[in-house]
Image (cartoon, grey):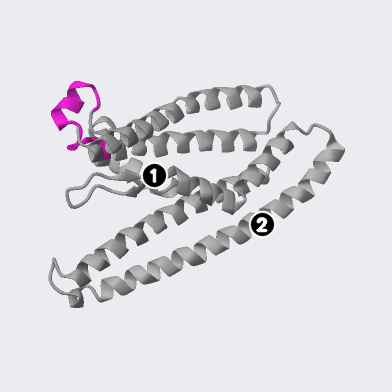
Amino acid sequence: MSEPLEVTACEAAVAINSAVADLLLPRHIFRLFTQQQEAGRVTPGYATAARRLAMQLIVVNLYRLWEARQHLLSPWLFKDDELRAMGFLPLEEFVARWPALLTIRHQFAEHMLSREADRGQPGRILPPELFGRALRESGLWEADAFLAEKAKITSPLLKVRMFQRSQDWTEKLLELQETLCSRYEAVIAQLKTIDADWEASGYTDSPNRSAKLDRLEELAQLCSYFARWRQHIQERIVQLSF
C-alpha cells in the first residue's frame, strides 16, 4: 500500500471509529433522560432538549459513516462489492428514506471532511491540530468548564449567582457567533467572485483556472470550519439557557 493510501486508511479508521462510538450514545441518553423526567429530577423541557441532541447524534453520525464510505474507503481502499461483503452497505440503501435524512442532517451540522473525494483523489478529514487550535481560540473550552461546574451546583443561592455568569457566557458566545457569521459571509463573497469570473479564467488546464480550483478548495474548507463552529457555539448557548 502506498503512503498516500496508508494515510487514507488511517483517516478512514479514525472517522469510522468516531462515528460508531458516537452512535452508541443516543440509546443511553434517551433512556437516562426519560427515566430522570419520569422521576421528576429534570423538567420535561430539559429532557426533550437532551433527546433532541441524541437524535442529532444519530443523524450526524450516520452521515459521517456515509462520508467515510463514499470519500475515504471506496474505491481507494476497497471495491464496492468488498464493502458489501463485509456488511458495509451504502447508507442510502440501508436508510429507507435517505433524502429525508439528508434534509434533517443539513439542519443539524456540516461536514466532518475538509475535502471531499474529487478529481481522482480521496477525501480528507478535518485536521485535528486545526480543530484543536480553533477550539482553544474560540474560548469554548472555558465555556465547557463553566458548564461542568454549573452542573455540580445544587445550592439555590449559588444557582442564582451562576445564572448571571451564564448570561455573561451567552453574550460572549453570541459575539463569537456573530464574528464567525461575518467571516463566513466573506468566504461566500469570494466564492461568488470566483464563480462570476470562471468563464474568463481560461481553458481547463490553464494556470489561472488551476489556481482558482486550489482557492476554491481552501474556501470550501473554511466554509466547513465556520459552519461546524457555528453549530458548536449554538449547542453551548442552548446548554447555558437551562
The magenta region covers 72-88
Residue at figure coordinates x 68%, y 57% from the top left:
171
The residue indicated by pointer 2 is 172
Residue at figure coordinates x 36%, y 61% from the top left:
219
* x then y, percent, for residue 172: 66, 57
| Label 2 environment density (alpha carbons within 10 Å; few <14, some 14–19, many ≥20) | some
Amino acid type of the residue tagged 2 in the rendering: Lys
Residue 97 at least partly seen:
no
Which label was assigned to residue 79? none
* x then y, percent, for residue 157: 87, 39
Q: Is residue 85 magenta?
A: yes
Reply above or below: 228 against 18.
Answer: below
Residue at figure coordinates x 54%, y 33% from the top left:
51
Q: Earlier in the sequence, mark 2 or mark 1?
A: 1
Give 237 or 226, whichever is nearer the viewer.
Answer: 226
* x then y, percent, for residue 218: 35, 60
Amino acid type of the residue tagged 1 in the rendering: Met
Secondary-structure class at tag 1? loop
Which label was assigned to residue 112? 1
Can you say which quadrant of the picture contains the C terminus?
A: top right
